[in-house]
Amino acid sequence: MSLCTHGVFLDADSIQPDELDLGSLKQAVPDLTFYPHTRLEDAVERIGSAEVVICNKTPMRREVLAAASNLKLITVAATGVNNVDLTAATELGIVVCNARGYSTQSVVQVVFSMILGLMTRLSDYQGAVSFGVWQQSQQFCALDFPFSELHGKRIGIVGYGAIGRAVEQVGEAFGMESLIAERRGVTEVRENRIAFEDVLAQADVLTLHCPFTPETNDLIAEKEIALMKPSALLINAARGGVVNEAALRDALKQGRIGGAGVDVLTNEPPTDGNPLLDPSIPNLIITPHIAWASREARQRLVDRLAE
């Protein structure tokens, strides 16, 4: 980032700044005001005469951008830029930048935490110990929940960017075979890719790392889940709208899929009516959009914002 005099970070609490070294960011923008979070109706006033806006999920709509007469640069503290009206920004001569590659290791760690937790039935065994099942066992172990190894399993990867490639590497370290999915609906399958529907049918674990676009909206819905193995695991650390949440809920409740790990939901924070918040759903791990957010990843993010 070239030196600019005045900037605002509209939703700084999204990166928990008190835990991080902000020196590089403050050097790049000496007069930088931090707001914990910003409502849409407060955005115009807070931006004021700023030349730089840093935001994560605060919507940057046309009316906000049009009122920001000095604004030259929007730096999104994330990879996705779907919260910014890019058309309006271009028309108004505002440059929009995002941060790439900062969270790869963090996301992969959370993805495999979910895969391992589900495949090894960790929550079931922890619950069994908590409720005294092991203590009442007639032998030294309590094998109430059969589990499988990752070795020899197939991991289907949808979205083959930096995170998808890193998932492939870790999967191979566990002895898994990687199936790299071609985009849905294309007629020609590229070299080293496998048709989307074939990946669904063959994968023991299906993990999603694609952006949210009109083409990936409801990418995994009832029809796609029906193609998957009943024992398969689905991991979504991409965007909530990539998976139809009602279809996933029904499949888990009816035993048509082995389990799911979800780090993202369609609306965040979610409302009580979200289909996946039903506590009776079995074999489901939900985390509150934290896969990107190890302390190290957030520090890398700050340093890249400064650049």
Image (spheres, rainbow, N blue to C red):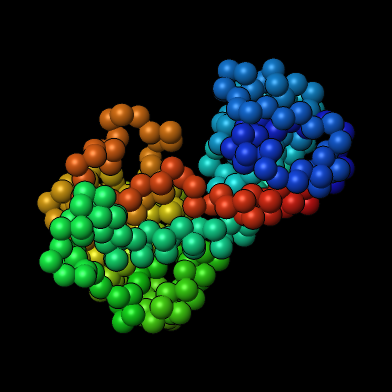
Q: Position of residue 86 (x, y in %)?
A: 60, 40
Please say if 228 is above or below 172.
Answer: above
Question: Is 163 placed left or right of 118 in the picture?
Answer: right
**Viewer-proximal residue, 61 or 105?**
105
Q: Position of residue 153 (x, y in %)?
A: 30, 77
Residue 18 visible somewhere in the drawing: yes
**Viewer-proximal residue, 212 or 109?**
109
Please say if 227 is above or below 193.
Answer: above
Can you tell which quarter of the image residue 100 is in?
bottom right
**Viewer-proximal residue, 22 or 211?**
22
Please tell me how many numbered marks the rendered image carries.
0
Q: Residue at x 70, y 21 (%)?
A: 46
Q: Residue at x 20, y 52 (%)?
A: 132
**Viewer-proximal residue, 13 or 189?**
13
Q: Position of residue 185 (x, y in %)?
A: 33, 63
Q: Residue at x 21, y 49 (%)?
A: 131
Residue 226 visible somewhere in the drawing: no
Q: Residue at x 47, y 69 (%)?
A: 167
Q: Position of residue 68 (x, y in %)?
A: 72, 25
